[in-house]
Image: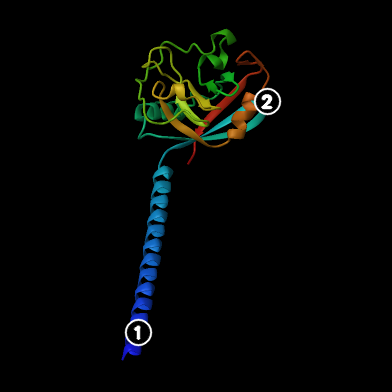
Amino acid sequence: MIKILKNSSLLLIFFMLTFSIGCSANQKNAENNLNKESTIAMQTENNTNPKYVITVTTRGQTLGDIVVELFPDKAPQHVRNFDSLVSIGFYDGTAFHRVIDGFMIQGGDPNSKDKPKNTWGFGDPSQRKIPAEFNDIKHKRGILSAARTPDPNSATSQFFIMVGDAPHLDGNYTAYGKVVSGMDVVDAIVAQPKEGSAPIDKIEMKIRKKE
């Protein structure tokens, strides 16, 4: 009788361990599935954000394409402004006129289409001003943000793409997009010959919406 009880106890312990392992495995599988579903949901959400292709040329040669994704949930007015300008071909022929190693590249000034180089970066005073939409996006490498004057509500068409991280810009400039491919092209822009922060040769852009 004692022997039988011992065997029964061993069987019970074995059953409990098996059940526990099975539950843990099921729980782990459920967590993995949940993580996969969350990842898919995030990817799907990101896929709804508009994307644009910035084709960059200089000296008659194409440096390549920079593909950017914009975040209408973070800065809806800036995204609408950018989209409307792209739709009318506003950016085509404008330049990346300010390039600072380890910091950022800036462009999109209408003056850089056909006006004297010493006016590039000053913008057109008749342009519509976009109010600040500061958010929680960090100004890290690859982030796209709105250029402005000292007035926080003075953004127009000019934007910059971060080459390095700049935390001092966080909460002070409106970040509204990021580069999803083509950072090698951004780096190629940085590598062009410059006088101070001004590229010697015009680095021209053309932007279209990615379907």
Q: Is residue 4 left or right of residue 114?
A: left
Image coords of residue 106 (percent x, y):
53, 21
Which residue is more in the foreground, 206 or 8? 8
Mark sitting on residue 115: none
Image coords of residue 122 (percent x, y):
49, 11
Figure check: 95 above or below 9: above
Point out the residue furthest to the bottom here: 1
Q: Is residue 3 left or right of residue 138?
A: left
Quadrant location of the N terminus in the rendered image? bottom left
Which residue is more in the foreground, 73 or 135? 135
Q: Secondary structure at mark 1?
A: helix
Image coords of residue 109 (percent x, y):
50, 17
Q: Which residue is mark 1?
A: 6
Figure check: 154 above or below 144: above
Q: Are marks 2 and 1 in contact (CB under 8 Å)?
A: no
Point out the residue furthest to the front here: 2
Residue drawn at x 59%, y 29% is 186
Figure check: 42 above or below 81: below
Q: CA distance from mark 2 to mark 1?
A: 88 Å
Figure check: 29 above or below 127: below
Q: Which residue is mark 2?
A: 60
Residue drawn at x 38%, y 50% is 41
Q: Secondary structure at mark 2?
A: loop
Tell me where residue 56 sits by quadrant.
top right
Image coords of residue 184 (percent x, y):
62, 34
Q: Is residue 161 left or right of residue 50?
A: right
Question: What's the residue type where badge 1 is placed?
Answer: Lys
Disc 1 packing (10 Å; few <14; some 14–19; many ≥20): few
